[in-house]
């Protein structure tokens, strides 16, 4: 079982870990990790694994193998010289990339507040994110919506995580905004992300500690992706 350190501390940039196993295609599993594995629209982290002899191995992505959310595999080049099981390694995140993803992921939670419609899909990017909404018509007051979005950023609201049991989650279906992606259950508890007193929803991704860290935002294109499906893009505004 791997300890997901990023769930309790998304700001930790480096840590040591013990190798559990490796695979012929360059995968590395560890007893603990700060690397987030791709899921929920957020890409897997990149960075390096440093062996005890000082050799640095590039991590090209991080995944849950075969959809198993209890495991994380760090992907490396197929010709990388991997450490042996039992050896201690040092993990180092590509922090600039991770932090931008954290800021955008939290920003997309704010987007789901200013567009109060069921979410049908989404993606977190370093410079741009998007949510798909079950929204028949595009609101006419987009400037006011963007102002509200940046008002939440300026308010510097606290962002925190809390846990509820699977049973409590099942009893509160209104917490789930996503129509096609259900919160992970079956492990006894579900993680919620709370933003001030404006939003509370299940999420396993990494987030900033306060909305003020996000920076200014601007709405991008709103595209029609079906009869009542609209894709809303969100960008970091240039300073």
Image (tube, rainbow, N blue to C red):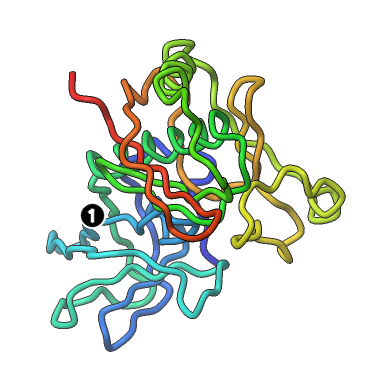
- 47 vs 216: above or below: below
Q: Quadrant of residue 26?
A: bottom left
Q: Residue 236, position in %: x, y?
A: 27, 31
Q: Residue 194, position in %: x, y?
A: 62, 31
- Judge from the rendering whether residue 179 lies leftward or rightward of residue 43; answer left or right: right
How many numbered marks, from 0 up?
Answer: 1
Residue at the spot 28% in from the left edge and 88% down from the top edge: 24
- 219 vs 26: above or below: above
- Judge from the rendering whether residue 23 lies leftward or rightward of residue 69; answer left or right: left
Screen quadrant of the C terminus = top left
Q: Between residue 29 and residue 142, name the one nearer to us.
A: 142
Residue at the spot 24% in from the left edge and 60% down from the top edge: 49
SS for callout 1: strand
Q: Residue 156, position in %: x, y?
A: 47, 14
Residue at image mark 1: 47
- Which residue is the extreme one toward the bottom? 24
Q: Between residue 62 and residue 203, name the one nearer to us.
A: 203
- Judge from the rendering whether residue 190 lies leftward or rightward of residue 117; answer left or right: right
Screen quadrant of the N terminus = bottom right
- 75 vs 174: above or below: below
Q: Between residue 153 and residue 39, name the one nearer to us.
A: 153
Q: Residue 211, position in %: x, y?
A: 45, 22
Q: Quadrant of residue 47?
A: bottom left
């Amino acid at each position: 079982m791997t300890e997901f350190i990023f769930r309790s501390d998304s700001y930790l940039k480096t840590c040591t870990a013990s190798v559990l196993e490796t695979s012929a295609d360059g995968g590395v599993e560890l007893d603990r990790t700060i690397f987030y594995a791709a899921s929920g629209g957020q890409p897997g982290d990149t960075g390096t694994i440093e062996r005890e002899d000082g050799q640095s191995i590039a991590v090209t992505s991080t995944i849950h193998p075969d959809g198993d959310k209890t495991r994380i595999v760090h992907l490396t080049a197929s010709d990388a010289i991997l450490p042996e099981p039992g050896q201690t390694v040092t993990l180092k995140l590509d922090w600039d990339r991770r932090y931008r993803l954290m800021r955008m992921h939290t920003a997309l939670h704010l987007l789901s507040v200013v567009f109060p419609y069921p979410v049908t899909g989404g993606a977190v990017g370093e410079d741009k994110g998007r949510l798909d909404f079950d929204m028949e018509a595009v609101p006419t007051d987009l400037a006011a919506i963007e102002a509200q979005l940046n008002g939440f950023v300026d308010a510097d609201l606290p962002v925190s995580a809390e846990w509820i049991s699977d049973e409590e989650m099942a009893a509160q279906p209104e917490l789930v905004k996503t129509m096609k992606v259900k919160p992970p259950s079956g492990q006894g508890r579900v993680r919620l992300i709370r933003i001030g007193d404006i939003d509370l929803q299940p999420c396993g991704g990494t987030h900033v500690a306060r909305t003020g860290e996000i920076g200014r935002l601007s709405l991008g294109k709103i595209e029609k992706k079906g009869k009542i499906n609209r894709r809303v893009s969100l960008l970091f505004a240039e300073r």
